[in-house]
Image (cartoon, rainbow, N blue to C red):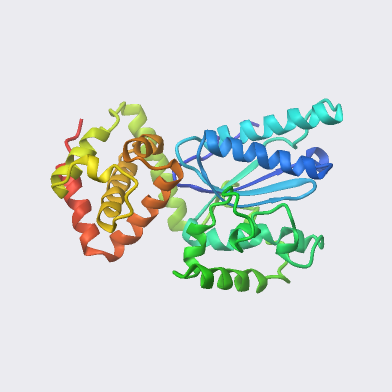
C-alpha cells in the first residue's frame, strides 16, 4: 500500500510523535536526552521553525512545531538520522532505532495550540513518572515557567494567550496545566481525520484549498513575487526610506511597518529568510511579527490602512 504524502504548509501547526522500534527505549542515559536536544537545537538553527512544546519519554518523543520555510520532513530527517547514528555508535547497535515513519498531525492552531502544549507536557504525569509536570527534566514545560532560558522553546506566543502581563500569564498557564493533572490519554490527539489533520470541518476545507491553490500555482509556474516591490510599496505608503524601517528599532511605528511588510510577504510566498535578511531581524522574529500583524489587522484601523496602502502599491511581476 502506497504511503500517503505528508501535508506540509507554511504556518502549519504539527504534533509530531516518533517511537522506538518495537517500543524499545531510545534514551539510555542523561547524555542521550541532552544529545537529542542538541540535535534538535542544531536543526532549529539550520532550518528555523517554531517549537512550542516537547517531551522526551524513555521510548518515544512528542514535538509541537510550526513550520516556516523548510518542510518539517527535512527537519525530522536531519534530527532522527543524526540521533540514530549517535545512538548506534555509542551502544554498538545496527538497524533502525525508530519505528517506521514518525507521525505528523496537522492541527488547527486556534483550537488546539494551548491544549496540545498542556497535553504534551503532562505526558510524564500520565505515565506516573512524576507527580507534576515541572518535576520532569526533559520537556519544554520549564520554559513556560521561566525556569529554562535556553531559548529552544518558543513560549512567548503561547503565553500571550494567557495574558498581556508575562508574570500573570505564567501563573494562569500553570493553573491551566494543573487543572488537567488527572486527565487521561486523549485518543483524539492521535487519531486525526484522514490520519493527518486535526480540526473543524472548516479547517479541513481550508487546508485542502490551500494545498490545491499551492499545487495550481506550481503547475502554472507563476513567477515568485518580488520582495523589492514589497519594499518600494512600503516606502511609498509611509514616505520613509527602507533604511529607516529595515533596522532593529523598537519604535512602535517602525515595528508596525515591518509587521505589514512581513504579513504581505507571507501572503505572496516570500521566504522567511529573505524577509529576515532585508529587515535586519532574526528568522524567528519574522514569525512573531507576522502573528503581530494578524492580530493588529483585526483591531487596528491604522494597521488595516497600512496593509491596504502597501498592497495597492505592489507591482506584480
Residue 89 in sight in this render:
yes
- x then y, percent, for residue 123: 72, 58
Most distant residue in the right direction: 92
Q: If the image is split into quadrants, where does the C terminus sit?
A: top left
Q: Nearer the viewer, residue 95 or 299?
A: 299
Instruction: Left or right? Give the position of 183 relative to 278.
Output: right
Q: If the image is split into quadrants, where does the N terminus sit?
A: top right
Count the numbered circles shown: 0
Q: Nearer the viewer, residue 207 or 61?
A: 61
Q: Quadrant of residue 122?
A: bottom right
Q: Nearer the viewer, residue 120 or 223?
A: 120
Instruction: Left or right? Give the position of 68 relative to 317.
Output: right
Q: Quadrant of residue 251?
A: bottom left
- x then y, percent, for residue 256: 28, 54
Residue 200 in sight in this render:
no
- x then y, percent, for residue 71: 51, 36
Residue at 67 percent of width and 72 percent of height: 178
Amino acid at each position: 500500500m502506497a504511503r500517503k504524502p505528508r501535508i506540509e504548509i507554511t504556518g502549519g501547526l504539527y504534533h509530531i510523535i516518533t517511537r522506538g522500534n518495537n517500543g524499545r527505549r531510545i534514551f539510555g542515559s542523561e547524555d542521550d536526552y541532552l544529545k537529542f536536544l542538541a540535535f534538535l537545537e542544531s536543526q532549529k538553527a539550520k532550518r528555523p521553525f517554531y517549537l512550542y512544546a516537547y517531551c522526551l519519554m524513555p521510548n518515544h518523543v512528542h514535538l509541537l512545531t510550526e513550520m516556516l520555510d523548510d518542510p518539517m520532513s527535512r527537519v525530522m530527517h536531519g534530527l532522527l538520522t543524526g540521533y540514530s547514528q549517535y545512538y548506534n555508535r555509542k551502544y554498538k547497535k545496527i538497524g533502525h532505532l525508530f519505528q517506521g515513519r514518525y507521525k505528523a498531525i496537522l492541527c488547527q492552531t486556534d483550537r488546539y495550540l494551548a491544549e496540545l502544549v498542556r497535553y504534551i507536557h503532562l505526558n510524564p504525569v500520565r505515565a506516573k513518572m512524576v507527580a507534576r509536570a515541572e518535576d520532569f527534566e526533559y520537556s519544554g514545560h520549564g520554559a513556560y515557567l521561566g525556569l529554562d532560558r535556553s531559548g529552544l522553546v518558543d513560549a512567548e506566543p503561547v503565553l500571550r494567550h494567557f495574558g498581556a502581563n508575562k508574570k500573570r500569564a505564567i501563573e494562569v498557564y500553570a493553573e491551566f496545566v494543573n487543572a488537567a493533572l488527572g486527565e487521561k490519554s486523549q485518543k483524539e490527539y492521535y487519531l486525526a481525520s484522514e490520519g493527518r489533520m486535526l480540526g473543524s470541518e472548516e479547517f479541513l476545507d481550508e487546508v485542502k484549498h490551500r494545498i490545491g491553490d499551492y499545487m495550481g500555482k506550481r503547475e502554472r509556474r507563476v513567477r515568485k513575487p518580488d520582495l523589492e516591490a514589497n519594499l518600494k510599496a512600503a516606502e511609498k505608503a509611509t514616505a520613509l526610506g527602507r533604511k529607516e524601517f529595515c533596522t532593529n528599532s523598537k519604535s512602535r511605528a517602525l515595528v508596525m511597518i515591518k509587521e505589514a511588510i512581513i504579513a504581505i510577504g507571507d501572503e505572496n510566498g516570500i521566504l522567511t529568510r529573505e524577509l529576515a535578511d532585508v529587515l535586519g531581524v532574526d528568522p524567528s522574529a519574522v514569525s512573531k511579527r507576522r502573528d503581530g500583524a494578524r492580530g493588529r489587522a483585526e483591531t487596528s484601523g491604522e494597521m488595516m490602512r497600512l496593509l491596504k496602502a502597501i498592497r495597492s502599491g505592489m507591482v506584480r511581476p
